[in-house]
Image (cartoon, rainbow, N blue to C red):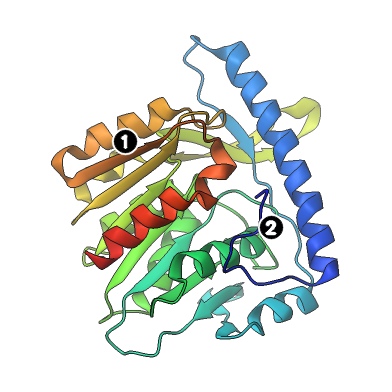
């Protein structure tokens, strides 16, 4: 993220330095992915990424949870596996809730929090984001299956509330799967979605060890309610053609918003993205 959102909270100096370092690494990785994609174009290869998990110091996590209105809230999803989360509770019991599924980022919670702050603004939304297994100090081993099962448990905490799933990049595959299993979610927003990708850990000579398949299209028929798709036309990580294919798979239930001149990471902070998601939540 290149600019601070108007409603984003200010991080500590340590967190800022760490976040900038992570962003630089992310841009290098995205550039590498774009080059690989260009070289393999036309060969039918599914794009492959590494899991970009990075540690998060306890003091930095505590600092994020101490921001006004926020709390650091952990969730044990199975014995010995606990996810770190950030939650902002609304004042009204009938207020809508947003559960955010982030992208594949080494600064997952540090990027999720300002996005959710900007999204809610002065609205009485409840918002929550949890770091995936292996990310930001959450325990456990990253896997596509575990991310989905954990996501279901996160949403089920809010049974009886009006819950909207908002997701970005890798998180769109997770949110699609969660939305297909938790049938009473109010809406799903897919920001810079993919059709399918492989994500895993690199071994010797840059080869992937048992990559995990993340996919979106297979879950679309089982999504209830309206679905928003937002995609930047200059997205080199997940080309806009992927967003168009996802929107096509949704039929009349889907709405596609294309952002001219907008790249992958920029989609998350674009004011048109925020406006489209808010409109869906408030309709």
Question: Marks 2/1: CA distance?
Answer: 27 Å
Which of the 4 quarters of the picture holds residue 139?
Answer: bottom right
- Residue bearing the label numbered 2: 107
Q: Residue at position x 85%, y 67% from top?
A: 14
Q: Residue 256 at what x, y percent from top left?
A: 30, 39
- Does residue 239 lie above or below 101 as drawn? above
Q: Does the rendering let one see residue 78?
A: no
User: Residue pushed farthest top?
Assistant: 42
Q: Residue at position x 31%, y 81% from top?
A: 95
Q: Residue at position x 38%, y 66% from top?
A: 152
Q: Earlier in the sequence, mark 2 or mark 1?
A: 2
Q: Residue 140 at what x, y percent from top left?
A: 63, 63
Q: Label 1, secondary structure: give it.
A: helix
Q: Does the rendering let one see residue 32?
A: yes
93 vs 235, left or right, is left
Q: Label 2, secondary structure: give it.
A: loop
Question: Quadrant where the C terminus lies?
Answer: bottom left
């Amino acid at each position: 993220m290149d600019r601070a959102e108007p409603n984003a909270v200010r991080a500590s100096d340590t967190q800022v330095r760490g976040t900038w370092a992570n962003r630089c690494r992310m841009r290098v990785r995205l550039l590498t992915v774009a080059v690989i994609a260009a070289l393999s174009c036309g060969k039918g290869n599914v794009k492959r990424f590494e899991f970009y998990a990075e540690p998060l110091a306890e003091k930095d996590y505590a600092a994020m949870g101490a921001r006004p209105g926020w709390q650091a809230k952990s969730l044990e999803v199975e014995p010995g596996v606990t996810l770190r989360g950030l939650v902002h509770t609304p004042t009204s019991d009938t207020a809508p809730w947003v559960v955010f599924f982030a992208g594949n980022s080494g600064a997952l919670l540090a990027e999720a929090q300002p996005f959710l702050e900007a999204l809610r603004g002065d609205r009485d939304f409840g918002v929550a984001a949890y770091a995936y297994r292996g990310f930001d100090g959450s325990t456990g081993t990253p896997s596509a299956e575990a991310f989905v099962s954990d996501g279901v448990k996160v949403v089920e905490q809010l049974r009886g509330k009006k819950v909207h799933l908002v997701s970005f990049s890798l998180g769109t595959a997770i949110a699609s799967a969660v939305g297909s299993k938790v049938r009473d979610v109010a809406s799903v927003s897919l920001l810079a979605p993919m059709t399918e990708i492989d994500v895993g850990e690199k071994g010797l000579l840059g080869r992937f060890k048992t990559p995990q398949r993340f996919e979106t299209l297979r879950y679309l028929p089982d999504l209830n309610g309206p679905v928003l798709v937002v995609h930047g036309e200059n997205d080199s990580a997940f080309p806009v053609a992927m967003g168009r294919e996802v929107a096509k798979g949704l039929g009349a239930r889907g709405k596609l918003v294309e952002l001219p001149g907008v790249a992958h990471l920029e989609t998350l902070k674009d004011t048109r993205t925020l406006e489209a998601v808010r409109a869906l939540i408030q309709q």
